[in-house]
Image (spheres, rainbow, N blue to C red):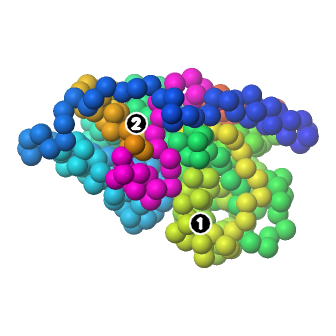
Amino acid sequence: GILLSLLLITGFACSRARLFQADLNKRISQTSPPSSPGTESPTLPPLRLAVSGLMTPGETLRGYGDFLAYLQERTGRPVKLVQRGSQAQINVLMQARQVDMALLCPLPYVQGQRTFGMELLAAVVHRGRVDHYSHLIVPQGSPVTHLTQLRGKTFAFSDPDSCTGWLAPAYQLALMGETTSKYFGQQLFTYTHENNARLVASKLVDGAVIDSLVQEYLRAVRPDLMAKTQVVERWGPLPSPPMVVRPDLNTELKAQLKHILLSMDRDVQGQRVLHKLQIDGFIPINEVAYDIIREMESRVKSLEDRGGKY
């Protein structure tokens, strides 16, 4: 029943909570980058960076513009932002060598690692932790306080390959023997967490999910929007979004990029960039931290293949 499901969820999250504690003062010390900024040839090929569908393209560019400039200065090569409509498209581009580096949701990382060997560089640290949550939001003033009250209602997901924007709520339903397609009266994918917040704020849907990191960012830059929503449940902890690279990227460039990420919080300019993104920095993370995503994905897929109820 629902009580058993809640106990399972609580135990599942608590058993992994220690995986996500981060101490920026105890990181593996990094060697100097392979080359010093400013010494590279201006004819070096560009670094193509993709950012997954957390926010609308305009807000992504505003939020990550300084980060792109920081990478360009530190690597001595042009840095181009690649934006696509879905998480899956970013994975396809990386597999085709059209994207070199990406900040991804954990689920497409797991899929890319399984499919073509996508590699971890580092994970986002936020408030001293390497985790984040999926938040269930409803319009301000809504009587809804729990996912079970949204049966037959209209619900917005972000992306079918998003951990916080699809997998987390799908997993909660799977624990009840339910699938999203049969549980909600109508479901839609908006392809950004920001769009989910807009739909809820406008009362165009009864509920939606939003990534906790995006929610905090939007609270700072769009408090008027977020004031029209309220969080009624949160699911996690889930491992932080990782910064990843394609497996065949130049080895020296990989090492340089990792060094840049892991040392950002130790220089003034890097700290300013991180502050704008509202994160502490980046830290190495072990592959095992993403096993929770693999387990959730497997549970949901198994139930969907059987068509619902156990």
Q: Amino acid at mark 2?
A: Leu
Residue holding disc 2? 262
Residue 248, quarter of picture:
top left
Query: Residue 220: where, in percent of width, then height?
Result: 55, 66
Closest to the observer: 269 or 6?
Answer: 269
Numbered disc 1: secondary structure: helix
Which quadrant would the N terminus be assigned to in this image?
A: top right
Mark 2 residue crowding within 10 angstroms, few (<14) / some (14–19) / many (20+): many
The secondary structure making up most of the magenta span is helix
**Left or right relative to 34: residue 167:** right
Residue holding disc 1? 219
Which quadrant would the C terminus be assigned to in this image?
A: top right
Query: Residue 102: where, in percent of width, then height?
Result: 38, 42
Q: Amino acid at mark 1?
A: Arg
Closest to the observer: 40 or 239?
Answer: 40
Q: Residue at x 76, y 53 (%)?
A: 233
Q: Which residues are magenta?
A: 267-292
Numbered disc 2: secondary structure: helix
Query: Residue 108: where, in percent of width, then height?
Result: 49, 38
Work out whether mark 2 precedes mark 1 in sequence or the reverse, and give the earlier one: 1
Decide whether residue 165 is among the magenta residues. Answer: no
Query: Residue 43: where, in percent of width, then height?
Result: 8, 44
Closest to the observer: 218 or 248?
Answer: 218
